[in-house]
Amino acid sequence: MKYKDIKNSLWQFRNITPLEDFSKKSRLLVLSQSPENKINAKDSIAEVMTLNKLNFFVISPVRIASLLVVSTGIFVGVYYSIIQISPFILPGLNSDKIIAEADMINRKIDIEISQINHFKDVSAESNVVLNSVQINSFNHLNKLTIEGEEEILNDSTNTNKTLDDEINSILKDMSK
Amino acid sequence: MIDGIENEKDLLRKAIGGESSAFGLLYDKYQPRIYRFVFFRVSQREEAEDITHQVFLNAWKRIEYFDDHGLPFASWLFRIARNKVIDHYRTKKTTEPIDDEFSFAFISDNEDNIDKKMALKNVYSALSKLSEDQREIIILRFVEGLKNKEISQITNKNQGTIRVLQYRAIKNLKNILREK
């Protein structure tokens, strides 16, 4: 069989048609149904949400109201969230007060630093003194200090000569 | 009777607007074609009638969702029919032979036509031995006379694939008929 004959035979198949009775009944049944509306209130929520049925150019009052409620809820939630986490919009925030408090803190810190430095100096001097007391030789002692101490010792021996004599006589008697 | 593209567009517009009489005229035009397409896929008259009825019921109910941007109304109908046939195959696979008396009743029984009837039966028999894809292409291209672009839109295959399938289908048909 040639290609041409095959094509002719296939073309002949266009004469195959449905029974007339079936066609009439089917037509009546089909047209007796009503087509689905894109904005049909009876549609299930799942069908309404499919992309095919979404009609962005027809907005019902119910949709507008629900949209407003949802957007208001979102706005309020975001607003309060921002208030909780943002330091820049805390109520009662006074920048001058904060600056004053900061200055006070700085001053306190300065005072403490100066005190630390003072004690540091004192500590250093104390170390020097303690070291000088521990050393046996007196080479480092101040000459004037030594003379002063000698005077004190001399003064103490001269002022009580009578008493010393009495003590010496007593000691003499005791040694007999 | 529908004449011309403009007239069909006008009918479509009215049908989408809800006019059942407009859709009725479209039904009259396309119902035989859809029936044939389905019949060659399922090979049983009753099943072909059921599926064809479902196709137009579905099309009328969802007529508002038809968007003709790039997809002709005929292609849309064939696409619905194709999906219905696929659903049919999922639930029920039948390989019963066709009703000979019915299918070739359009050929009168005189001597000249006996050979013609026999040739048609042979071609039909060879057609049933093709793969589903090849048979579908042959029906759409050579029985319904659709162009490759329309077949591509119906089957979601690119036109290159359509051409290859078409070539192989015709070649296979010839080989099968040569063996008879």
Image: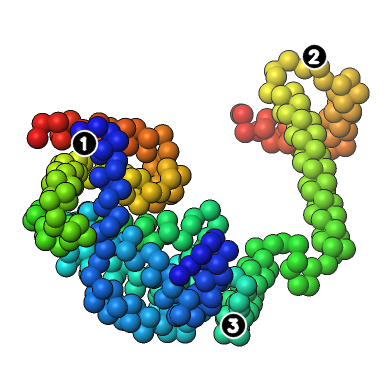
Chain designation of label 3: A
Foreground mark, 1 or 2, reads 1
Quadrant that contains the N terminus of chain B: bottom left
Mark 2 closeness class: few <14, some 14–19, many ≥20 residues within 10 Å: few
Give the mark nearer the N terminus: 3 vs 2: 3
Q: CA distance from mark 3 to mark 2?
A: 110 Å
- Could you tell me residue A156's position as x and y percent? 84, 34
Badge 2 is on which residue?
Answer: A139
The reply to whether dot 1 and dot 2 touch (C-beta < 8 Å) is no
Badge 3 is on which residue?
Answer: A60
Q: Nearer the viewer, residue A88 or B173?
A: B173
- Mark 2 secondary-structure assignment: loop
Chain designation of label 2: A
Q: Is residue B116 left or right of residue A167?
A: left
Q: Residue at x 68, y 30 (%)?
A: A172
Q: Is residue A170 left or right of residue B24?
A: right
